[in-house]
Image (cartoon, helix red, strand yellow):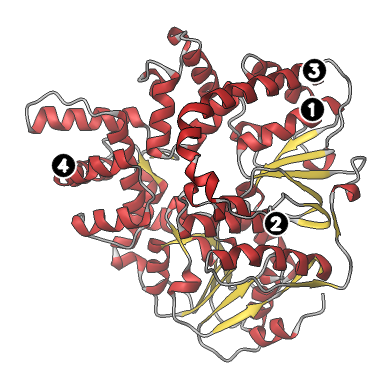
Amino acid sequence: MKLTKEQEDIINSDKISFKINAVAGSGKTTTLLEYAKKNSHLRILYLAYNKSLQVSLQEKLKDYNLPSMHISTIHSLAYNKVGAYNYNLTHELKNQILEKALYTYEYTVNQKAYYPVAEYIALIKDLVNFYCNSSLIALDSKLIESYKKQSELSAKILELINKNENKVLEHLKHILSSMKNKVIDASHDFYLKMFYLNKKISTNLPYDLILIDEAQDISDVMIGIVENQTCRRIYVGDSFQQIYTFRFASNALNKIDLPSYSLSKSFRFGDNYAKTLQNNLNVLYEMNSSKPLEITGLESTTQIGKNHLDLNKPFCVIARSTFGLVQQLVYFIHDKKKIYFEGGYNSYSFMNQTVYSIFYLKQKKNDKITIDEIKDFETIGELEQFAKDTKHQDYLNIIKFINTYGDNIFDINKKIKEHLVSDKSQADIIFTTTHKSKGLEYDQVLMADDFISKKEIANTKSKLSYQRINEELNIYYVAATRAKNVIVLADLNLTYTYNESEESTAFVKNRFVSKKADNKKSKELQEEWLKKNRVNKVNAF
């Protein structure tokens, strides 16, 4: 690949440390490896965002003679140094474990029976995750204020915090102590935090240069670990691909004051499409007073529109949510094509024990519920309200799925498994969400219709924050930049004009009409499924 002037400027840079803002498909990995090759006398640590990217980088490294380069995730780096193998580790903290720990604590320390509400347990769980991802050290009111500032909390959760701040901090300390002492399972972010706090082992790492990939989506604790080093540092990422703030990620490109370079040319798609995407998205970025997107592409042409999508060739369906993805599934599932899910089918909330349990909760067959957390609720209405209060999007997606398709969810799952393949190269259709598609590319992409649009931004009743709007636009950008040859874009509704009457009638509509309308829509979708289930082939559009 011929290097661009932007790439050559970076590779030949005489700056000790710097940052690179690189658009999607701009060859950032190649640029970093070429830079490393030129500075091969240095001991280099390449921090990959996750395990899959680490494996991919190690494969690419075979083409380079860089024996002094070590590729690792930051968690892997911390794992051995902090002795994380001594902890009882879990990928997700269990609500029932936290509830039991707090009950035992209150009974032992304060001699009283304590039965926290589900929302309080969710709050403690979220606070643990926030603390472990933050660079803050003290467990005090400053931590609470920072948490409230960085989270879009419901009125109920805010009330719980404000009325119980001292108790919240007391319980948070107990949970963290219980993890450390192996009384309860510890999260992987917990031992990373322990690594950060132990300056004896986390500073002065044996490297001359650290390369930090996906710098727009790393946590403050990760930034803190890197910035505590005395060696050279290069941060590389794409500010427009920041899509993990819900996991308390930060954009290091904005936080770190270093000389800056850009990689603005994508090698993935044509310049015609780059300009179309840039112009369309900038209408909405500017509405949100956000920095405009600047991107160029190849001299070749990328086809835009559903009339260019060749259904006889492999293509990828990308949705904003799992519910948006399942709606696409019901269109294509009758085509008898081989299907594949990025990240594995079991990682999607279409059909698993949680889905079964919520289904049985709605059917009032509580004796069949197998997920402990779901057992705490008497009705699906209670669960839905809990999910709204705690911003539990997985639960909301599953409830929407069940309410829409009813008993047909089992048949949908059966048909999916009939056509499911484990080898991606054999698939006719690849299904994925935006978050799972990050870092990947496809010849043909069809975007679902569940992405943000101008209407949602312009209509103030949506009450979306600046941060939320910006991230939703970034999610659109990530999905839209996965395509190489053909792209069917989700409609941004750029011609929409805000109408005040929509706002004035919103309350009445939401209070008296929405429920009826939702029921009607659910019935229509169920009937649509049944109708399509009786034919061999359906038109995807």
The image's mark for residue 495 is 2
- Mark 1 to mark 2: distance in Å? 33 Å
Badge 1 local density, few (<14 within 10 Å), some, or many (20+)?
Answer: many
Residue at image mark 3: 531
- Mark 2 to mark 4: distance in Å? 51 Å
- The amino acid beneath tag 4 is Lys
Mark 4: which secondary structure? helix
Badge 4 local density, few (<14 within 10 Å), some, or many (20+)?
Answer: few
Q: Residue at x 42, y 38 (%)?
A: 92
Please say if 384 is above or below 6: above
Mark 1: which secondary structure? helix
Q: Please state if 205 lies on the left or on the right of 505 as rendered.
A: left
Does the image show residue 82? no
Q: Considering only order in the chain, which callout, 2 or 1, is on the residue closer to the N terminus?
A: 1
x and y, in percent, of residue 463 in the image: 45, 50
Residue at image mark 1: 333
x and y, in percent, of residue 434 in the image: 64, 49
Q: Please state if 356 lies on the left or on the right of 140 as rendered.
A: right
Q: Nearer the viewer, residue 222 or 533?
A: 533
Please say if 377 is above or below 472: above
- Mark 4 to mark 3: distance in Å? 55 Å
- The amino acid beneath tag 2 is Thr
- The amino acid beneath tag 1 is Ile
Residue at image mark 4: 167
Badge 3 local density, few (<14 within 10 Å), some, or many (20+)?
Answer: few
- Mark 4 to mark 1: distance in Å? 51 Å
Mark 2: which secondary structure? loop
Q: Considering only order in the chain, which callout, 4 or 2, is on the residue closer to the N terminus?
A: 4
- Closer to us: mark 3 or mark 2? 2
- Closer to us: mark 3 or mark 1? 3
